[in-house]
Amino acid sequence: MILLLSSTLPIILIIFYLLHKTKQPRALTTLPPGPPQLPLIGNLHQLGTVADPHIYLYHLAKKYGPIMHMKLGSIPLLVISSAKLAKQVLKIQDLAFCSRPNLLGQQKLSYNSCDVGFTPYNEQWREMKKTTRIHLLSNKRVQSYRPIREQEIAHMITNISNCSPLGQELNLSEMAMAASIHMVCGIVFGKRYEEGGSEMKRFLQILEESEVLATSFYVSDYFPTFGLVDKISGRVKRADVMCKGMDSFYQELIDEHLDSRSVKKKMDEVEDMLAVLIKLKNDDESSSSGITWEIIKAILMDMILASAGTSPSATIWTMTALIKAPKVMEKLQHEIRSLVGQRGKVDEGDLPKLPYLKAVINESLRLYPPAPLLLPRETIHASILDGYEIRPKTMVYVNAYAVGRDPEYWENPAEFIPERFLNSNIDSKGQDFGLIPFGSGRRICPGMSMGFLTTELMVANLVYSFDWELPKGIHAQDLDTNPTGGLVVHKKNALLLVPKCYGV
């Protein structure tokens, strides 16, 4: 976004020159406080040039308060940074705040609002969410994916073990991402790509381009009158080229599933999500019989984009926090190894018996939520929030990163203390508004349960199977926690560790 905004600034300045004499509407005195705005572009120069907007907004909120008003071009922006106000936005006034802004890249990704994640709040969205919840992500369906999760995590542990006897450092970030991608491919469309092969490279390209489209800056998003600028600059054409490649990828997957040799499923095989969606489309008696190929492709995009990054992000942030807190690591290893013994691996059936593991992951999600700004919301109608008038069509960021550090909700919020979740009813399932890594309310992430399972199982097996050390010369206090940008935030610098097999 930084490069795109920089290259667009001359165009924006030209727009400003053309419009500088236009009478601007008088600002309401009932708006929340916020940082000063430049004419026309508002605060775009601030948010468009920072690599980690969630951290920037967190520090900005310390000056202007937990409810801030900003402007992104012509679009009013509301930033929420406290648990109290998050509860208002995500629960008490959820209906007023539950739509999505109509951003060009996200609309192209979603086949013009055919998905669950980026689509504005309407009847079609409610039907798609219902279909996803009942047919793809129900508890029964999530449990049916268990063999894939356990198989891919076991494969990851084996690969790490092969490095362990040599005492060499490995890139745990890459290992976790590879395992997650294999799980996503198996669960969503029933394939497993060879590491380093052409199909895997193509999938990674699709994943990267989806992230780029979802976060790209387009002039028309913030200056609707000047949408022609995006066409003249070639950005719309580049977006269309990327979308065409994604569509071809999805269509090939669909064609393979429609092939008579592919649709005959063995009894012991897991029915992937694409197979379920095709079955729904072909079922005339199904309540979801109105599903189209565009809807299927948009939901495929949702599942791939949302699932591939969140679990490895949460896993690596958790492992980073554990390495920086060796006493917590020791306590967690004792809990897991005492339960599992010499069995050799942690199964999903063990997870409910590991309360400290859940506390560790909750604490990691509090400090390092994978999607720290959640997905932006948009107000449907006017409302009053904390005494301020909020207009319709206002974009809303709920900063989960800032909420997790809210000093009015958390004691010692900057410290990694998993014990705060022991003997506590607080969890990260969206009902405790100081901890909202997957959102809450109508727009809560529908894949939350599967995300928790995957992260818990991955972390549990990594902690059980190995004793972890930092590379020679690196100390725990030197380990950075710098984030990347994007919808899903990863550790910027890969987590490099030296594993030693447990019991060796």
Image (cartoon, rainbow, N blue to C red):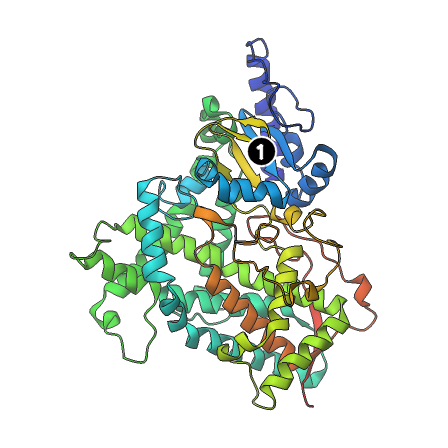
Residue under the point 66% across and 44% down: 51
Instruction: Inspect this view and state whether residue 2 appears.
Output: yes
Q: Residue at x 59, y 75 (%)?
A: 354
Horizontal arrangement in the rendering, residue 251 relative to residue 442 (left or right) = left
- Res 240 visible: no
**Residue 213, how many percent across, how many down?**
48, 44
Determine crowd level at label 1: few under 14, some 14-19, many 20+ residues with C-alpha closer than 10 A: many
Residue 208 vs residue 414: left or right? left
Q: Amino acid at mark 1?
A: Leu
For the point 60% across and 34% down, the residue is: 5
In which quadrant will I find the C terminus?
A: bottom right
In x, y percent, where is residue 464?
63, 80
Q: Position of residue 423 (x, y in %)?
A: 63, 67
Looking at the image, residue 86 lies above or below residue 461:
above
Question: In the structure shown, which secondary structural element does the residue marked by tag 1 occupy?
Answer: strand
Q: Provide residue 67's location: percent of width, then percent of height.
A: 63, 35
Position of residue 234 relative to residue 36, above or below, is below
Residue at horizontal 58 percent and vertical 48 percent from the top? 486
Indicate left or right for 108 with 209 as reference. Answer: left
Quarter of the image with the N terminus in it? top right
Q: Height in image: 133 above or below 52?
A: below
The answer to which of 102 and 339 lies nearer the viewer is 339
Q: Nearer the viewer, residue 298 or 245?
A: 298
Residue holding disc 1: 78
Q: Quadrant of residue 428?
A: bottom right
